Image: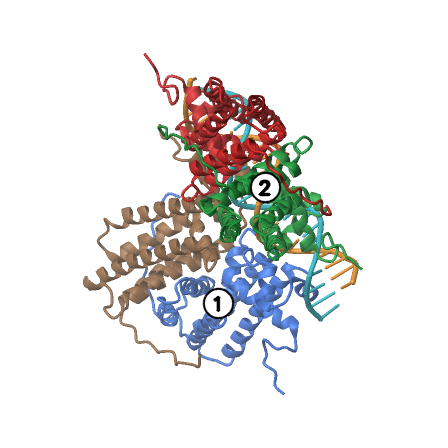
Chain colours: A red, B green, C brown, D blue, E orange, F cyan
DNA sequence: CATGAATGAGGCTTCATTCAT
DNA sequence: GATGAATGAAGCCTCATTCAT
């Protein structure tokens, strides 16, 4: 029998985790009380403490779960693609889907910002995640450079950060204003903008250094 | 004689506000206790309550203050510029300066994410701010379109969101990893990428619509 | 075996409520801190907040409880009586018992005065209670008038207020000075005075209207 | 030039006291913060502390002031009257005036109830006041007995308590519900009821002693 | 497994009071 | 005389956590 992967009555731990993820994604860590999760899951706080050592474990498991899902999906879908530009586009599409589907990306973005200077353990998790993500994108760009698809004078690391930034910044605007912010188009165009920039020789004016 | 604008012994309210801004910018709202601010300012909690009605007033004043500074600066510096492309670059530079100088932008980005679905009053403030910001950028783009500098087939609103997103996403990576993330270069390149995209006819592959 | 109705270990909520009632009756609302109740009950403040939403809920429940007890008792004991005069006397006796037994009436009188212009929710509860009480007494008087026991020229509403006032005023003197104020005799005589006044034609000098 | 006795700009202490009296009368002691008085008087807290040692001094002075006014007025108006019945009626009228005029009596009744078991110094003041008041009324009744106007078998002390109680109980109902409780008529009738009872031989059924 | 009950720490807020100016 | 500023104690309330059953 194929059980549904999530919300299964079979695995209460998994189910509680899903509820926790929703709460953390929506309200962040501090504003999510254990009681809020328990009520949302229809159990008592005691039940949560039966399955999880403490709030931090719930949090870390939530993050690990979503992060794992996201990264596994990225690897699975991008790996078979040979065209780096198409890989970038696929990455954008996956982000879009995870951003709009059941708070998959929102958990990550929300907690990442909240963790800054506040939850060291979490901060490390996210810093590592971002480094992994940038490294992954940088490597796609390197591929493109070797294939001659992309300009050879771009800094892959820097470009990877620009791509990651664009994605996150758009997501946040979408979480803030889902009714009026068209995340799909914005991500799509940003990918194209990014690829266009990667693909051609661009003479650029440098900023003049100002005071400060 | 140039008096220090802030931290003046003369105006305790202003001084407390500055301390509060630093705390909120670094730790967010929930993780900043009144006592933390008080200790950082070298006073007792009571002093804070003498000057501010409650924690929310402190927060709102902090945000209003930094937001005002940022928006005033943007208007002042960008208004006299006639070349829209140069306006965009200036905007980028201002963001960089406010992001790296005493938590000016960090307050905004951090609280904006934290507020999502959690602090309605704050959420509104930031939603309005983002709309204003996008409208401002969109209008620069419209100018560029009229001058023939930019492509006429871009959706200015969408493009404005893309620009705003890029800036925020880069900032967050910088706050998370200031030692290894070069915000200045990233912002500079992102502006150029953006302007490059605005400036030329770009044939784009559309995403295939997937389920979801 | 007759189990003690209250203070049962079985129902902690009820037990806490009883302690709260005693405190409120004795010290009023403002001078009763949550901690005072908790200490009197031998628990910590947290326990109170487990059972009651906040201090106001504790208060309202206390009042509702005592008010219910009093009003139920009045109805039960007075309803079967056919002689209105005897009903009035019974009312007096019940008030005496509830005034001298475990702060039953004191809670009501104390909080009613404290609530004036200060705790709107409470004020309403007590205003309604007084109106109910006066209506009840007025209806007894109407009965007496119809039976020909009482003078037909008295305003039943007014008389009911006079009765209610007499009872409360005596109670307060008793709470203030229990050692030297004989509440039983005072209530008894006041009932007789009231019934005497109700029972006979009394020519009365009117107050001359003064300025003010 | 004849200055108004109260609210005079001439005597700030007196003026502050008047404001304090109004606040205490309306909200009681605990619910009247120093700041509330200061704001109502249009000064800062510091000014209050310049004129009064602490909150308790403000309170005690307030009470002493109103109590003095009331008792002086009673003595002045009642002393010249030779007919005890008329004295009682005059007493009722004075109470009515002081109850309806600028919180004169309300201060007393409100604080007296609040003080119970809570503010020992205040409690003593009011216990003494009530004893004085009852003694005063008892002495009127004794006069009436000696003149043959009143029954000789009443306990003057008890009767005095009954009178005092009636007055206070009516006042409270009036403070609670000024729009629908006719204090003047209620007091008037209560006086007549009282005098009627004092004036004639009343055979009375005694309450049967119940358990408790 | 899970609940009901409770704890204790910490956070927000009020308020009487003090004091330098 | 009076103010603005500040303190410190105490009160209300939330919440992560524990534990007996």
Residue A34 visible here:
no
Q: Please give the label number shown on residue C124.
A: none
Which of the pair F6/B87 is nearer the observer? Answer: B87
Which of the pair C105/C187 is nearer the observer? Answer: C105
Mark whose residue sits in front, 1 or 2: 2
Q: Is residue D173 above or below residue B203?
A: below
Residue D64 as seen in the image, left or right of residue C142: right
Q: Quadrant of residue C156?
A: bottom left
The answer to whether marks 1 and 2 mark residues whose Cβ atoms lie closer than 8 Å is no
- Return the chain for callout 1: D
Q: Is residue C122 above or below residue D61?
A: above
Q: Residues within 10 Å of mark 1 (few under 14, many from 20)?
A: many
Q: Residues within 10 Å of mark 2 (few under 14, many from 20)?
A: many
Query: Percent position (x, y) of residue F4?
Result: 69, 61
Residue where numbered disc 2 is placed: B191
Q: CA distance from mark 1 to mark 2?
A: 95 Å
Residue at the farthest top position: A1
Residue where numbered disc 1 is placed: D138
Residue B76 visible here:
yes
Image quarter (top left, top right, bottom left or bottom right) of the C terminus of chain B: top left
Query: Percent position (x, y) of residue D167?
Result: 43, 66
């Amino acid at each position: 029998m194929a059980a549904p992967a999530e919300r299964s009555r079979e695995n209460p731990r998994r189910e509680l985790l899903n509820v926790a993820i929703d709460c953390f994604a929506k309200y962040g860590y501090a504003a999510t009380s254990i009681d809020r999760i328990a009520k949302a899951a229809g159990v008592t706080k005691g039940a949560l403490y039966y399955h999880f050592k403490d709030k931090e474990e719930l949090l870390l498991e939530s993050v690990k779960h979503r992060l794992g899902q996201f990264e596994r999906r990225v690897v699975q879908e991008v790996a078979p693609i040979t065209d780096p530009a198409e890989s970038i586009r696929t990455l954008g599409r996956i982000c879009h889907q995870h951003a709009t589907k059941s708070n998959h990306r929102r958990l990550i973005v929300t907690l990442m910002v909240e963790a800054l200077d506040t939850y060291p353990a979490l901060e490390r998790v996210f810093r590592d995640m971002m480094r992994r993500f940038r490294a992954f994108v940088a490597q796609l760009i390197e591929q493109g450079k070797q294939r001659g698809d992309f300009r050879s004078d771009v800094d892959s690391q820097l470009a990877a950060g620009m791509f990651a930034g664009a994605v996150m910044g758009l997501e946040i605007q979408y979480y803030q204003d889902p009714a009026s912010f068209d995340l799909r188009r914005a991500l799509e165009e940003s990918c194209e903008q990014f690829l266009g920039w990667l693909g051609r020789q661009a003479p650029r004016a440098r900023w003049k250094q100002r005071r400060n």
